[in-house]
Image (cartoon, rainbow, N blue to C red):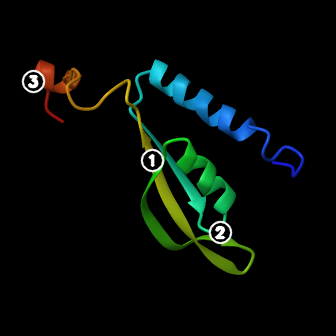
Amino acid sequence: MTAEAQGQGVGTALIAGLARASEAEGYWTLQAQVLAANTASLALLRKSGYREVGVRERLGRIGDAWHDVVLLERRSTRTGGRGLPTYECPQQATGAKS
């Protein structure tokens, strides 16, 4: 994103749109992987409801430098999760074996 576009709400709007679209399709979890040094993206995702679930050390490489990658996820409060229906796998329902 260009410096002029930063702080204008573009990233927030895009992430909110992704969350709405994923929930409309029934997705429960969104995942993101961000370089630990990218503090602006990490702050944006955290502000958008993502939480850190781990760090993969020295996973991302830029030029000659290795970087840690932060794993984040956002769980929907509208779809999936506890208390909602669970669907059987078609293989299980028919008794087919893999």
How far apart in space, not on screen, are marks 2 and 1 (Cα)? 18 Å
Query: On the image, which quarter does residue 98 sit in?
Result: top left
Q: Amino acid at mark 2?
A: Ala
Give the number of the disc on residue 73: 1
Q: Whole-percent x and y of residue 83?
A: 20, 25
For the point 14% across and 20% down, which residue is it? 93
How far apart in space, not on screen, are marks 3 and 1 (Cα)? 34 Å
Label 1 neighbourhood size at 10 Å, few (<14), some (14-19), many (20+)? some
- Taking depth in this image into account, of 67 and 49 the one nearest to the observer is 49
Label 3 neighbourhood size at 10 Å, few (<14), some (14-19), many (20+)? few
Query: On the image, which quarter does residue 34 sit in?
Result: bottom right
How far apart in space, not on screen, are marks 3 and 2 (Cα)? 49 Å
Q: Residue furthest left?
A: 95
Q: Which residue is mark 3?
A: 95
- Taking depth in this image into account, of 36 and 5 the one nearest to the observer is 5
Q: Whole-percent x and y of residue 13?
A: 68, 32
Q: Amino acid at mark 3?
A: Gly
Q: Secondary structure at mark 3?
A: loop
Give the number of the disc on residue 24: none
**Seen in the image, is 53 located left or right of residue 44?**
left
**Seen in the image, is 47 located left or right of residue 37?**
left
Q: Whole-percent x and y of residue 3?
A: 87, 52
Q: Are marks 2 and 1 in contact (CB under 8 Å)?
A: no
Q: Which residue is mark 2?
A: 37
Label 2 neighbourhood size at 10 Å, few (<14), some (14-19), many (20+)? few
Q: Whole-percent x and y of residue 80?
A: 31, 28
For the point 38% across and 32% down, which residue is it? 28
Please report whichever mark, 2 or 1, sits nearer to the chain's N-terminal start.
Answer: 2
